[in-house]
Amino acid sequence: MDDDAVLIDRFLEMMAAERGASRNTLLAYRTDLAGAGEIVGGLAMASKESMATLPQAWAQLAASTVARKASALRAFYAFLEEEGLRNDNPSASLPRPVTRRPLPKILSVQDVERIFEQIEQRVATSSPPPLDLRLSALIELLYGSGLRATELVSLPRRALATDRPFLILKGKGGRERLVPISDRARAAVAAWLAHVPTDSPWLFPSGKSHLSRIRLYQLIKALAAGAGIAPDRVSPHVLRHAFATHLLEGGADLRALQSMLGHADIGTTQIYTHVDSRRLVELVNSRHPLATMPNRRVDGEASAP
């Protein structure tokens, strides 16, 4: 059980830094994970068979509560797998009650422009501070390529080649994906790279390792506040959502977006199709064949031109 406490702490640290989870959410996750650990005799070494006992233990709970508990466990084991702490995921047998999935938090294009205006003001000098160049590279990669926070902070120093407008990432579950890198992002990384020690294995080094997720989270909150945006609206994951939403608004193909985000299931990507109903209404009003037909009154008679 001591192993469980350590792993749960690491998982919740990630949730706070990468997902911007609130204190109440973190407390709920801790309670759900600890409770499940007591039922199965410990989460660290739990098997698919022991996980299969949970639905019966949860039989009297509301569907929304079961969904929350199962979601916490799936996220926990996905984290352990991604971090190399387990090479399997025993949570496949957990129930998936039908509940309304919440829409992701997003930023408008105008919000993102304000964030980039803040960065441009910082680097628009003859000798911009190295940490501002680092911040510029971080934000360009987060919003320009939709990287996960963990993927971003752990990028190798040579991840981006000057003659290649993409990089190959190994994300969740060991799945590799190709991520396009914009000219802006490549330029921002090149400017920052001049300040990275040549013997560093990381693109964003910090101490003996790389920049932490928590520090990235703090940097983004401070940047949002400077841009006049409520810090609780912005996190690394929200910028990833903005990347996806704004690409779809620009006409991106859903399958291409799934590939860029590294989603194993197209259903995960489809959440973004529900985000901007305004654009869908505008699309119908401007592109549907009915849009070019004469207006008609309710009584069926053609209205005057």
Image: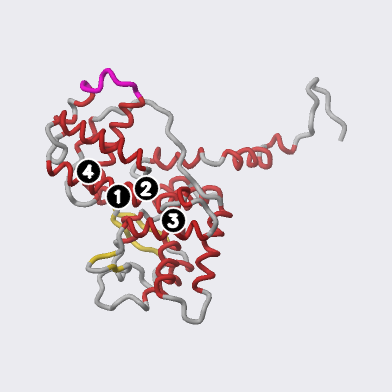
Residue type at the position of mark 1 = Met
Residue type at the position of mark 2 = Arg
Residues under numbered marks 4 and 3 in contact, where contact means CB atoms less than 8 Å apart: no
Residue type at the position of mark 3 = Lys
Distance between the Cα atoms at labels 1 and 2? 7 Å
SS assignment at label 3: helix
Label 1 Cα neighbours within 10 Å, binned few <14 / some 14-19 / many ≥20? some
Image disc number at residue 8: 4
- The magenta span reads 56-63
Image disc number at residue 14: 1
Distance between the Cα atoms at labels 1 and 3? 16 Å
Distance between the Cα atoms at labels 3 and 2? 12 Å
Label 2 Cα neighbours within 10 Å, binned few <14 / some 14-19 / many ≥20? some
Above or below: residue 97 compared with residue 305: above
Q: Earlier in the sequence, mark 3 or mark 2?
A: 2
Q: Earlier in the sequence, mark 1 or mark 2?
A: 1
User: In which quarter of the view is residue 145 placed?
Assistant: bottom left
**Was residue 244 drawn as part of the magenta stretch in this picture?**
no
**Was residue 60 drawn as part of the magenta stretch in this picture?**
yes
Q: Earlier in the sequence, mark 4 or mark 3?
A: 4
Q: Earlier in the sequence, mark 1 or mark 4?
A: 4
Residue type at the position of mark 4 = Ile
